Structures are given as structure tokens and as C-alpha cells.
Image (cartoon, rainbow, N blue to C red):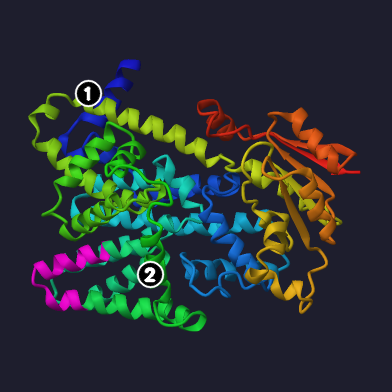
């Protein structure tokens, strides 16, 4: 029995070069089942993977949308447009507006709904990835790509985050699908190309850099002398981009596409102010994210598809080269490219294996590489789906959101730098004291001048770390009508010194609640304690 099982598995993964180390046709599953699998793990992530991954996916989406709903003109009263997608924030504003109209005010419930919406939306990545691969090759490859887009370790986790780098993927994949389908049918129709341009524009208003995908596709059409198709793509892009981004900029700022101009001006001036690295940094990111040695297989496969799928190939290559040459190299920037590498990588690698004597004679080695790939991705993917990220910053505020009579809270960070608190999770209007007092021309000017009244449930947040003395904190508290009721102490290092500083301001503190770090946070601290600090949190009540 055991021998039979091993033989079946070996056949499933190595039987035929046509399957690229994948199961044969009788072992394959339909698209509907792949979508159900993708939905299942995304639903797990939506309910259990709380918190946020990066600063942008919270402070430049959730904070802004809730601020608009609370009546604060975040972004809108600044002289220059924001460097982020206002269209995407408007979508969240609409979600929050509907939820509050239905009587839902809990920040955790709101975020669960947001993650569920993203989980459903992200199925389009799996669907169009499958359909594109099927159009360009065969169902066996399409099913492998579909499973990869459904289950590769970062896909479920990232798909439910508020990341424009992930949200921009479905429209640009749909655009490529329309172009490939129209090119294969060869009916000389331009409308599919017009709608492809519209979809490229939709991806663009989420994430400006995706214009490079559309630009690559357009250049290929020009090279092929498909003038009408190229004009149709450009026209569709311009019309849709104007109706969305152009109109937003006319309403809130000075002229159409003012946001785009401001974005590129800022990034040109501040190119070296953020995470940077060597020109090959994104190449290493791709190889690491897609799990070696299979990641190397996919890169080799991608390189072999220039003639098969020139629009996809050159669009992706231009995107990669542009990001590699630009100094700012945050890993999430390359996320939009990864589905394209999976699609073309699988197709190209399959063809290479079929022609390669080396791999034909080493089918067990190939099968082992793919088995390693799937085992690691499944374990990591399931683990990430249960990951509570930034728990030390989110969970204390969720806990305090249940304190109805709270006027203020002190966030104490010891000898480390102050981390921007996600005050959205308090479930009520709130602000950090520095912003409230110093940056009065930013949001709070009308309130400070008495032209508007603070909401009754307003909460003031104060911060304390090595850069602020207890005397300075006391001065802030004395100047504000919102007195702290709780102190949140982040981390457990140097506790004697830190508590002595706190007792200078609050002689009587009573420990009320302790929050332990998530397994993910503990693992990061174990692997790199210098960068990832201890995430234990203690909440004290001021007596």
C-alpha cells in the first residue's frame, strides 16, 4: 500500500514534462475549486489576521477615511495633494459611512468587514491569472498558476491588507486578459483595447506606478504597428483616469492630475529619504518571496516568454527595471509584479522543461523542488493567515476602546523612539497631543480657536520616551483639558527606570491588563531582537 502511494505521488509530480512537475490531468482540479480554496484561506486571514502590515496601509487609508467621516479635513486642507490614492480612501470612506449608518461603530468590526471585502476582491487575481495562463498555454499550467496565486505564502495575508500594491493587481491583469483575448480572436475590434485602457487606468489610480504595465503594453502595440489598438488603449486610459483622478483633483485641488504632479515632484526630491539598496535588491526580493529554487525556475521561465506574450513580458520588465533603478526600494513596491512572474514563469518554465534533456533525466529532482515549494508555502501561508501584526500597537487601543469614560491615555515607549499610534482603534475621535497643540494649522486650528467643539467622547493621547522628560509630559497634561486615565507601557526592558519616570507624573498606577505579543511578533523578536523589540504591553490605570 505504501509503495503504491509513493508511486502515485511520483507520477503526479514527474510523469510528464508537459505538466512542469505538476499533477497530471486526472489529478487536476477545476477553476471553481481553486477559487473556493483561495476564498477559504482568505476568509481565515480576514477573521484572524488582525492589525496592519505597514504604515501606509493604516495611516494613509484607514486613518484618513475615518477622519473624513468624523468631519476632519485630513489631506484636504493642505496646499499640495497627498502622495497616496484618494480614490482608494474614498472607497473606505463609503464602507465606513454605510457601517455607521447601520449602527456599526466598533473599529474591530469595521476592519473585519474591510478585510472581508478585500478577500472577495482578491479572488479576481486568481481568476484572471488562471484565465490568462489558459489563453497563453494550457489548463495544466493555468491550474498551477491559479493554485500559486491562491496559496503562495504571502498572497492570502497581503490580499486582505489595505495595500494599494495588491489592490491594483486585478484591474491590470484583467486589462492584459482583454488584450490577449482580442489578439487571439483577431477580429480587428478596438473596443476590447479601449476597455483594457480603462482597466489600466483603474490600476493607475490605485497605484501610480502601474502605468508602466500599460506603457509597456502600448509600446508593444506600436512596435507591432497596431495603431488603432494602441490609440484605443491610450484613449481608454485617458478617459478613465480623467473621470476618476482628474475629477478628484479638480474638486479638491488646483487642476486635473495635480496629485500625479505632486507625487513625482515629492519622490524626485526625497528619493533617498526612505529605504534604499543596490540595483539588484528587487531581484533578490523576487527570488526570496517566490521561494528558491522554484523562484529561479520562474525567473528563467519569464525570460523565455518575450515572443509568446510580448505585452505582458515588456510591461513587467519595464516595471521591474524602473523600480530597480529608483533609489527608494521598499519590498512591497514589487508586489504588483509577482503575479505576472508566476503566470509567465510557469508558462516559460514548462516549455523549457519539455525541451531540456537535463530535466527530463532528473524528474525526481524537479518533483522534490516543487514539493519543497508547496510544503513551505502551505505552512507559511496558513501561519500568516493567523498572524496578528502590530499587535502591541493595536490591541491596547482595542482594549481601551471599551472604556467609555476615558479622556486621555499616555503611551510610554521607554528608551525607544515613539511609534505612531493607530488611534482609529480607540473607536472615537482622538489625536496625539503634539499634533493637537503644535500643528494647529494642520487639522485642529478651528477647534483651538473655539470655532468648533470637540466631540464629547474625544480622547487625547500623550507620548513619553527617552526624548521627553517627565516634566515636559506634566506640562503637556497641565495645558490640556483631557487628563490621562490610563498608561500603556510598551516592552519590558529597563522597567525599573521607566516606572520611576512615570511615577514622577503619576504617583499611583495600578496594573490592569497585560497583552502578550503574537506568535509572529515573538518569532521576529527571537530572530532579530535588535530590530524587532519586545512586544509585551502593560496597561495601568491612573489612580
Image x and y of residue 454, in percent: 78, 70
Task: Write down the quadrant of residue 458 in the picture.
Answer: bottom right
Image x and y of residue 467, in percent: 67, 43
Q: Does the magenta stretch include residue 2?
A: no
> Dot 1 lies on which element?
helix
Against 400, residue 190 (above or below) is: below
Against 88, residue 30 (above or below) is: above
- Let me know if residue 122 appears in the view: yes
Against 330, residue 414 (above or below) is: above
Q: In this view, does 288 lie to the left or right of 53?
A: left
Image x and y of residue 31, in percent: 35, 51
Main SS of the magenta part reads: helix
Classify the position of the N terminus by image quarter. Answer: top left
Q: Nearer the viewer, residue 382 or 499?
A: 499
Q: How crowded is the residue under tag 2: few (<14 C-alpha within 10 Å), some, or many (20+)? A: many
Q: How many marks?
A: 2
Q: Is residue 359 left or right of residue 443?
A: left
Q: In this view, does 214 lie to the left or right of 450?
A: left
Task: Write down the quadrant of residue 296 in the picture.
Answer: top left
**Residue at point 47% right, 64% down?**
84
**Residue at point 52% right, 47% down?**
53
Residue hosting label 2 = 202
Q: Is residue 222 magenta?
A: yes
| Label whose residue precedes the other's in the sequence (2 or 1) | 2
Residue hosting label 1 = 364
**Residue at point 57% right, 42% down?**
389
Image x and y of residue 404, in percent: 84, 56
Task: Write down the quadrant of residue 363 in the picture.
Answer: top left
**Residue at point 68% right, 55% down?**
423
The magenta segment: 213-231
Q: Is residue 387 left or right of residue 322?
A: right
Amino acid at each position: 500500500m505504501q509503495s503504491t502511494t509513493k508511486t502515485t505521488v511520483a507520477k503526479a509530480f514527474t510523469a510528464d514534462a508537459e505538466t512542469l512537475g505538476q499533477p497530471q490531468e486526472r489529478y487536476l482540479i477545476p477553476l471553481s475549486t481553486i477559487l473556493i480554496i483561495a476564498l477559504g484561506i482568505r476568509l481565515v486571514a480576514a477573521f484572524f489576521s488582525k492589525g496592519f502590515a505597514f504604515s501606509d496601509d493604516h495611516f494613509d487609508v484607514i486613518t484618513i477615511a475615518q477622519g473624513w467621516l468624523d468631519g476632519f479635513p485630513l489631506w484636504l486642507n493642505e496646499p499640495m495633494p497627498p502622495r497616496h490614492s484618494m480614490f482608494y480612501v474614498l472607497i473606505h470612506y463609503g464602507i465606513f459611512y454605510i457601517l455607521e449608518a447601520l449602527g456599526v461603530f466598533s473599529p474591530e468590526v469595521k476592519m473585519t468587514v474591510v478585510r472581508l471585502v478585500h478577500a472577495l476582491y482578491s479572488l479576481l487575481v486568481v481568476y484572471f491569472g488562471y484565465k490568462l495562463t489558459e489563453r497563453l498555454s494550457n489548463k495544466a499550467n493555468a491550474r498551477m498558476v491559479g493554485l500559486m496565486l491562491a496559496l503562495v505564502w504571502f498572497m492570502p495575508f497581503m490580499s486582505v491588507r489595505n495595500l494599494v500594491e495588491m489592490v491594483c493587481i486585478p484591474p491590470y491583469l484583467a486589462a492584459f486578459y482583454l488584450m490577449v483575448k482580442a489578439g487571439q480572436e483577431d477580429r480587428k475590434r478596438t473596443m476590447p483595447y479601449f476597455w483594457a485602457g480603462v482597466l489600466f487606468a483603474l490600476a493607475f489610480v490605485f497605484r501610480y506606478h502601474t502605468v508602466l504595465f500599460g506603457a509597456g503594453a502600448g509600446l508593444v502595440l506600436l512596435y507591432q504597428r497596431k495603431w488603432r489598438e494602441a490609440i484605443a488603449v491610450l484613449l481608454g486610459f485617458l478617459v478613465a483616469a480623467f473621470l476618476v483622478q482628474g475629477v478628484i483633483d479638480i474638486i479638491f485641488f488646483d487642476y486635473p492630475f495635480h496629485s500625479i504632479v505632486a507625487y513625482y515632484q515629492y519622490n524626485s526630491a526625497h528619493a533617498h529619504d526612505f529605504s534604499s539598496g543596490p540595483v539588484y535588491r528587487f531581484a533578490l526580493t523576487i527570488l526570496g518571496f517566490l521561494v528558491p529554487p522554484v523562484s529561479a525556475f520562474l525567473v528563467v521561465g519569464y525570460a523565455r516568454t518575450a515572443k509568446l506574450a510580448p505585452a505582458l513580458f515588456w510591461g513587467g520588465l519595464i516595471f521591474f527595471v524602473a523600480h530597480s533603478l529608483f533609489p527608494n526600494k521598499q519590498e512591497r513596491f514589487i508586489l504588483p509584479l509577482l503575479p505576472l512572474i508566476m503566470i509567465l514563469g510557469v508558462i516559460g518554465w514548462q516549455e523549457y522543461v519539455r525541451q531540456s534533456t537535463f530535466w527530463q533525466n532528473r524528474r525526481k529532482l524537479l518533483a522534490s523542488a516543487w514539493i519543497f515549494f508547496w510544503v513551505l508555502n502551505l505552512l507559511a501561508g496558513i501561519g500568516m493567515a493567523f498572524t496578528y501584526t502590530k499587535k502591541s500597537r493595536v490591541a491596547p487601543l482595542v482594549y481601551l476602546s471599551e472604556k467609555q469614560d476615558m479622556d486621555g491615555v499616555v503611551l510610554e515607549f521607554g528608551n525607544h523612539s515613539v511609534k505612531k499610534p493607530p488611534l482609529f482603534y480607540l473607536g472615537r475621535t482622538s489625536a496625539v497631543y503634539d499634533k493637537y497643540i503644535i500643528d494647529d494649522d494642520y487639522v485642529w486650528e478651528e477647534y483651538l480657536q473655539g470655532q468648533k467643539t470637540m466631540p464629547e467622547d474625544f480622547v487625547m493621547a500623550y507620548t513619553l520616551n527617552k526624548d521627553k522628560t517627565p516634566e515636559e509630559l506634566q506640562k503637556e497634561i497641565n495645558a490640556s483639558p483631557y487628563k490621562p486615565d490610563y498608561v500603556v507601557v510598551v516592552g519590558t526592558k529597563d522597567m525599573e527606570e521607566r516606572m520611576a519616570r512615570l511615577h514622577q507624573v503619576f504617583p499611583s498606577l495600578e496594573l490592569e491588563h497585560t497583552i502578550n505579543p503574537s506568535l509572529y511578533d515573538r518569532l521576529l523578536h527571537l530572530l532579530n531582537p535588535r530590530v524587532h523589540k519586545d512586544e509585551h504591553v502593560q496597561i495601568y490605570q491612573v489612580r
